[in-house]
Image: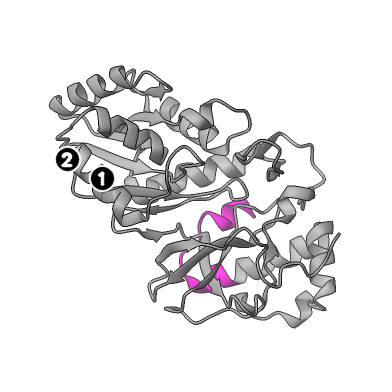
Amino acid sequence: MKEQVFNIKNNTDFTQIALDVFKHQFSNNRVYRSFCDLLYIHPSDVTSINEIPFLPIQFFKTKEVLSSKSEIQEVFSSSGTTGSVTSKHYVTDLNWYEESYLKGFEYFYNNIEDYVVLALLPNYLERKGSSLVYMVHDLIEKSKHSESGFYLNNIDELAHKLKVLDTQNKKVLLIGVSFALLDLVEKYQFNLKNTIIMETGGMKGRRKELIRNELHDLLCNGFGVHQIHSEYGMTELLSQGYSKGNGIFKSPPWMRILTRDTEDPLTVLPQGKSGGINVIDLANYNSCSFIATQDLGKVYPDNSFEIIGRFDNSDIRGCNLMVL
């Protein structure tokens, strides 16, 4: 199945493989099967991806969401405030994750070896179980540049390296959490010509939350660039979407975003309508590929999408359909 997923060519391929994955997970994922049973939805009744049930993301906080009986190789966990319940993604085959993020990066940015990869991810590095750190560490290794690496609190060294690499006309990818990138440009001013700045979101109580336009304006001015790139990923997904500017994301061929009605979570909205974000991530073959997130967004006719906010602290309306 892995080869089929990562060689999807068109909408027909995607739909057929998504329906096959749904049948597989219905049969092999106890948590997902119970959810579908409660909704009285069976694969024999499902003929389109809009009819597939999307599992509320909260189940990753309380259950082992698995469609495989293989040994667990890695447990990725979300960040959270002290005492909060974090999401856990149990991964039985890391090859799915590695192939997803490597092929996904290449799909949007070409060969990783073309870049020096610098990572400013302090709050992620300070804890265990981050899927983002796992991915970026591998991208750093595969870049094969001795200058590539992680930065924690040594932003003076990072600032110097950014300026030197840029004057050497080397292609650089600086991937960082939002508050750390802001810390950097508040201390230093740049005029970068060969560097991609990619934010991964996340103030996590470190700073006042900013809307995307405010954040990107500050970062554009501070780094001297025209656009800020963004990565859309989460602990519960093995694939990522990327934005090359203006907050418009695109996903690789094996990932798709839909929006659902905020009042009726089982209803998928037409493209162009704002609603809750549902993600189909076929790389999640061994967990659950159909997830109802807590993000709000809009999907455009070319399947690009925009994140416009999050549901508030209350649970997503209609998602408390069951307690397993």
Residue 148 in magenta stretch: no
Residue 224 vertical placement versus 233 (above, below): above
Q: Name the one closer to the observer, 301 or 323.
A: 323
Q: Which residues are magenta?
A: 1-15
Q: Which amino acid, by three-letter code, is at mark 2?
A: Gly
Q: Are marks 1 and 2 in contact (CB under 8 Å)?
A: no
Q: Residue 321: x, y in percent? A: 79, 70
**Residue at point 45%, 57% (across, down):** 252
Q: Amino acid at mark 1?
A: Leu
**Residue 142 in picture, x, y percent from top left:** 42, 29
**Horizontal arrangement in the rendering, residue 29 relative to residue 192 (left or right):** right
Q: Which corner quadrant of the image does residue 225 belong to?
A: top left
State which tag comes first along the sequence, 1 or 2.
1
Q: Going by the image, does 192 lie left or right of 22?
A: left
Numbered label attached to residue 136: none
Give the label on residue 218, or none.
1
Residue in front for this viewpoint, 83 or 50: 83
